[in-house]
């Protein structure tokens, strides 16, 4: 089932790990049409205005309400910022998620990292994979794979990995 509604781009001021995120709210009434009774994250596809989106997570915010993060690339394509209205058309995305082949090959050489990665929920595995595959150059992709394998073998999570880069 596809649903449509209008939403305003909002930005978290201080909200833990979501601080600074730009997002849209997906009210319980709308989320309930997509996935009745669900209170866990799920993936959707569709359009924000005319910009196509796929495999975007709706994140639970309590009482059946969800949010959808709208990253910088999406905002640039939409040519909209915080406070702007967007027309949303979404439906559940049931497409199979694939992981970075290059990353998986490198994990095979590091048993501790591979074991840690396999224990992560699929959504967290996807986060690593999308981050690696979003690299614009081969050297950046290689650097990201090395960093991910190294930090996974040291039992670090994604946010700890990213924070280690800032030091």
Image: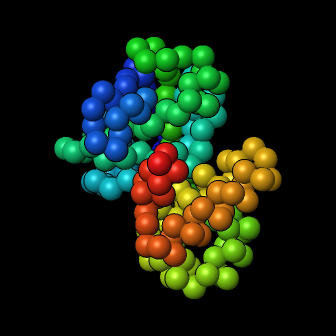
Front one among 37 and 96: 96
Taking depth in this image into account, of 79 and 164 the one nearest to the observer is 164
Q: Residue at x 72, y 51 (%)?
A: 140
Residue 122 point in image, percent of width and height: 49, 67
Residue 95's quadrant in the figure?
A: bottom right
Query: x and y percent of residue 93 in the render?
Result: 54, 51
Q: Is residue 103 in sight in this rendering?
A: yes
Q: How many marks?
A: 0
Q: For this view, does 144 lie left or right of residue 44?
A: right
- Residue 72 placed where, x, y %? 56, 30
Residue 43 seen from this side: no
In the displayed structure, 44 sits above or below 24; it is: below
Residue located farthest toward the left when viewing the structure as drawn: 63
Question: Could you tell me which residue is drawn at 79 percent across and 47 percent down?
Answer: 137
Residue beneath the point at 61% across and 31% down: 73
Residue 39, x across and y down, in percent: 28, 53
């Amino acid at each position: 089932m596809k649903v449509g509604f209008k939403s305003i781009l909002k930005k978290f001021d201080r909200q833990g790990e979501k601080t600074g995120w730009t997002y849209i709210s997906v009210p319980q009434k709308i989320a309930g049409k997509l996935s009745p009774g669900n209170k866990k994250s799920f993936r959707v596809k569709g359009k924000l205005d005319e910009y196509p989106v796929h495999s975007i997570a709706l994140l639970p915010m309590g009482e059946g309400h969800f949010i959808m993060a709208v990253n910088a690339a999406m905002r640039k394509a939409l040519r909209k910022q915080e406070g702007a209205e967007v027309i949303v058309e979404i439906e559940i995305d049931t497409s199979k998620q694939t992981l970075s082949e290059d990353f998986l090959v490198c994990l095979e050489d590091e048993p501790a990292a591979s074991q840690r990665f396999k224990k992560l929920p699929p959504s967290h595995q996807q986060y690593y994979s999308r981050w690696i595959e979003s690299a614009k150059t081969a050297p950046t992709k290689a650097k990201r794979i090395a960093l991910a394998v190294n930090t996974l073998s040291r039992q670090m999570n994604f946010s700890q990995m990213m924070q280690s880069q800032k030091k």
